[in-house]
């Protein structure tokens, strides 16, 4: 027995991403500060995330705090963005009624267990795409490979290869084709089309959390969930049922804070996407990162609504 279909986020919500990029890109053109910061750059700076092609086209002493590669939000949020996504996603699965197996009938347990497995599969699919795009794809990541294929190179690294006369082809390829090694060698990526890894990661992570949170929230707001909550509250108010009340209270606190964590990550992700749109990358590089991310979101979250066979595998959040 499956649960009835519940409201899911409309694909229209994805319009927030092109709107953010458009506003940020326009601001970067209109703002004298943004224009001056970009034009004062003599050569690209080092990337602000490991294993991604160079994201910065700004001076070493930018006028705006968010244009600095060492700003605290970049260091402790964007650089480890997928870790924040994973922690927030795990909190949903652990604490939201859509997945919680405690205090549930056998039928409810089966439904929630299936939801948990499908949610984990959706996370695995998104993580696989993120990993192949930004970390490794049978060697250099897809972003690095596309940069080199379109004519990009690590000029300083190429000079060092020639100077020391490296004989190993694998060492040469590693030096020439990975942004992390280029950065370590003091090189700079030049030429080529540099798909924005920041835009890709921030869009994919925040979209994933948004779809999952809305789906989980729809389950929590359903009439059956409301009845269960009322029952737990009555038990919690009974002094003779203190242990049950403690469990219910703990569950309520976890449910509340898991949603706060998720929406905190999403909102900060949107803000950093806006900062990326202002300070980093060309228009085409930002929009190509957006296109890859939204294509992934479409396959994982939109396509199952139109393709029942795919829905049976990956599911729909909250259903």
Image (cartoon, rainbow, N blue to C red):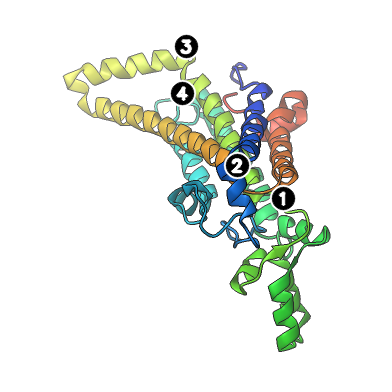
Residue 282, percent from left and from top: 70, 47
Residue 174 in view in this figure: no
Along the line of sight, the residue nearer the viewer: 66 or 135: 66
Q: Residues within 10 Å of mark 4 (few under 14, many from 20)?
A: few
The correct choice, above or below, for 229 with respect to 296 in the image is above
Q: Contact, CB < 8 Å: mark 3 with mark 1?
A: no
Q: Contact, CB < 8 Å: mark 2 with mark 3?
A: no
The local secondary structure at tag 1 comes to loop
Left or right? Give the position of 122 relative to 167: left
For marks 4 and 2, give the CA distance: 51 Å
- Counting residues from the start of the chain, the first of labels 4 and 2 encountered is 4
- Counting residues from the start of the chain, the first of labels 3 and 4 encountered is 4
Q: Which residue is mark 2?
A: 278
- Counting residues from the start of the chain, the first of labels 2 and 3 encountered is 3
- Counting residues from the start of the chain, the first of labels 3 and 1 encountered is 1
Q: Which residue is mark 4?
A: 105
Q: Which residue is mark 3?
A: 223
Mark 3 against mark 1, which lies toward the viewer? 1
Quadrant of the snapshot with the C terminus? top right
* Snapshot quadrant of residue 150: bottom right
The local secondary structure at tag 2 comes to helix
* Snapshot quadrant of residue 305: top right
Residue 256, percent from left and from top: 38, 28
Q: Residues within 10 Å of mark 3 (few under 14, many from 20)?
A: few
Q: Which residue is mark 1?
A: 195
Residue 229 in view in this figure: yes
Mark 2 against mark 1, which lies toward the viewer? 2
């Amino acid at each position: 027995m499956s649960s009835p279909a519940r409201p899911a986020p409309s694909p229209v919500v994805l319009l927030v991403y092109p709107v953010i990029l458009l506003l940020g890109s326009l601001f970067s053109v209109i703002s004298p500060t943004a224009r001056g910061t970009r034009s004062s750059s003599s050569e690209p700076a080092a990337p602000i995330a490991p294993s991604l092609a160079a994201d910065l086209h700004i001076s070493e002493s930018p006028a705006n705090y968010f244009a600095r590669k060492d700003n605290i939000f970049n260091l402790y949020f964007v650089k480890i963005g997928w870790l924040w996504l994973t922690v927030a996603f795990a909190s949903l699965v652990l604490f939201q009624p859509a997945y919680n197996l405690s205090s549930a009938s056998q039928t409810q347990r089966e439904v929630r267990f299936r939801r948990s497995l499908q949610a984990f599969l959706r996370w695995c699919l998104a993580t696989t795409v993120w990993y192949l795009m930004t970390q490794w794809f049978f060697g250099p990541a897809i972003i690095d490979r596309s940069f080199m294929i379109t004519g990009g190179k690590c000029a300083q690294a190429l000079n060092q290869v020639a100077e020391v006369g490296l004989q190993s082809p694998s060492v040469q390829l590693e030096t020439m084709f990975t942004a992390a090694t280029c950065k370590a060698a003091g090189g700079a990526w030049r030429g080529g089309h540099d798909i924005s890894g920041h835009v890709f990661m921030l869009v994919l992570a925040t979209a994933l959390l948004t779809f999952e949170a809305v789906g989980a929230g729809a389950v929590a707001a359903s009439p059956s969930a409301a009845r269960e909550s009322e029952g737990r509250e009555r038990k919690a108010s009974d002094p003779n049922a203190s242990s049950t009340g403690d469990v219910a209270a703990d569950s309520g606190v976890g449910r509340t804070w898991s949603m706060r964590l998720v929406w905190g990550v999403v909102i900060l992700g949107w803000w950093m996407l806006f900062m990326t749109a202002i300070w980093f990358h060309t228009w085409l590089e930002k929009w190509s990162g957006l296109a890859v991310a939204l294509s992934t979101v479409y396959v994982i979250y939109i396509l199952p609504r139109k393709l029942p066979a795919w829905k049976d595998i990956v599911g729909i959040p909250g259903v």
